[in-house]
Amino acid sequence: MTAVSEQAPPANRLRKNSLGVGAITFMVISAAAPLTAVAGGTPLGMLMGNGAGFAGTYLIVTVLLLLFAVGYVAMSRHVGNAGAFYAYAARGLGGLAGGATALIAILSYNAMQIGVMGLLGAATSGLFAGWGINLPWWVWSFIAIAIVAVLGYRQVDLSAKILTVLVLCEYAVVLILDLTILKTGGDSGLSAAPFSWSQITSGAPAIAILFCFAAFIGFEATTIYAEEARDPKVTIPRATYFSVLLIGVFYMVTAWLMAVGAGVDKLLPALQGLQDPTTFLFGLSDRYAGTLLTHAMSILFVSSLFAGVLAFHNAVARYIYVSGREKLLPQSIGVTHSAHQSPHVASVIQSVLAAVVVGLFAVLGLDPVLALFSWLTNVATLGVIVMMAVASLAVVMYFRANPSAQENAVKTTILPGLTFIAFVVIIYLIVINFGNLSGAGGFLGVFLPGLVLIAAVVGLLLAGALRGRDPVAFESLGLPLKD
């Protein structure tokens, strides 16, 4: 009996030592959905933002996120909690800030996952319609919700293996196109003009910056898997830096070659002449690589979206689980499966919520892309950048309160302070441009970004209530679990 009990998994714990650097890296890259960002976000960012200068904007955003990562990973060595942003806020700024951040995280990752479900349903419907199978978008969204629900319920390494395969395929098809354009020299020869300051600042560079940030959403989720990582003090920092570099360099090079492929001076007229700018990459594929690659890319565009919703499902399930485990939400939510050690209750809650929201948009006849995808993913982008700002400030405050942590001041004060200021500016740009970015006007243009503030207030109230009924639990918010 003793031997059996010693081998049983610890009660209410995520599956330890199940994810290495590669698995976590691909989990978070899949959330960024590289092919989706390249095929969907990049042409729109070029059209609405700064044209060929979008490649240079990717470079700037990559550098900024690398600077953010310095303080982020420095604190990860001291705060190993699956609550990630929430844990950072709780340990650096106090339990009330932690509660507010937890609810912003739950809102943001739910909004991103459910919003992408809309685009996934529409893209899958279009793909299968070309093969003679005509079904409404919401049917495909519900099928995806069901598959994600099963994978999210099971142990995390199964999801990691699936996402690794899908992400590698995404990278492969785009890199083939990149190499083909590079080899041919594009429309008018290779040019460094997309990285010139005049190109970067042309048009609407603020809009371009926001599209670039949206394309990175997901990389920050490395710390969510801290409790499941092998040697997290090494694994999490490496996975974070690898994620930023792999995503950023891939986006920057591909955006540059997309501009070169169309011709730097011809890019904007070409985009303006398309009824749907998201077909731009596929047109380049037809032109330079042939229809076979384009067909493969069309299929992998759908799988890219699926990989994204699975990764975001895993992220939000862990935030819900930790909020329950640490008594911000009902403790019945904060439990893990006896066999899979997955946050199964939180996973089921997220799946039900996704089904309800998708069903509501379907019943109301709202567009899955222009409404469900655009509205919710822009709310999510705003929420995640708010959490990045909070995390940057939390890093500064945590190390000021814990000088014995012995980290370099550049890592713990100067760079986090600078990125905090940068994120505050970006939050301002998102709020004032929200209607243009999301297509939501009037009341919705105010209400949708206001959801982030509402979530923060709800989280603040929940944390305040916890402080009143269980001061010990309140003081323990965000602390690493003891082995």
Image: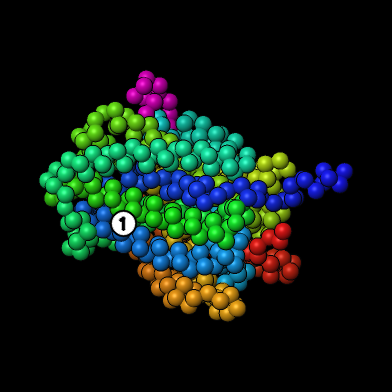
Of residue 373 and residue 188, the one placed in the foreground of this image is 188
How far from the left and from the top, in percent, is residue 235?
54, 56
Q: 164 left or right of 16?
A: left
Residue sitting nearer the eye, 8 or 421: 8
In the image, residue 78 sits, relative to residue 377, either above or below, namely below
Q: Indicate the position of residue 341 as horizontal and vertical percent values.
A: 68, 45
- Picture quarter with the C terminus: bottom right
Tell me the kind of residue under disc 1: Tyr
Taking the view exactly as shown, the residue that stands out farthest to the top is 132
> Which portion, as a residue range, is magenta?
126-137
Quarter where residue 296 is shown: top left
- In the image, 6: left or right of 430? right
Decide whether residue 397 is among the magenta residues.
no
Name the residue carrying label 1.
58
Residue 130 colored magenta? yes
At 67% from the left and 55% from the top, the residue drawn is 324
Image-quadrant location for residue 328: bottom right
Query: Which element carries disc 1, helix, strand or loop?
Result: helix
Rendering coords of residue 281 (x, y %)? 27, 40
The residue under the point 60% across, 56% down is 231
Is residue 138 rendered to the left or right of residue 228?
left
- Based on the displayed image, in which of its 4 quarters is residue 339 positioned? top right
- Percent of width and height locating residue 177: 27, 39
At 40% from the left and 30% from the top, the residue drawn is 125
Left or right side of 468 for 314: left
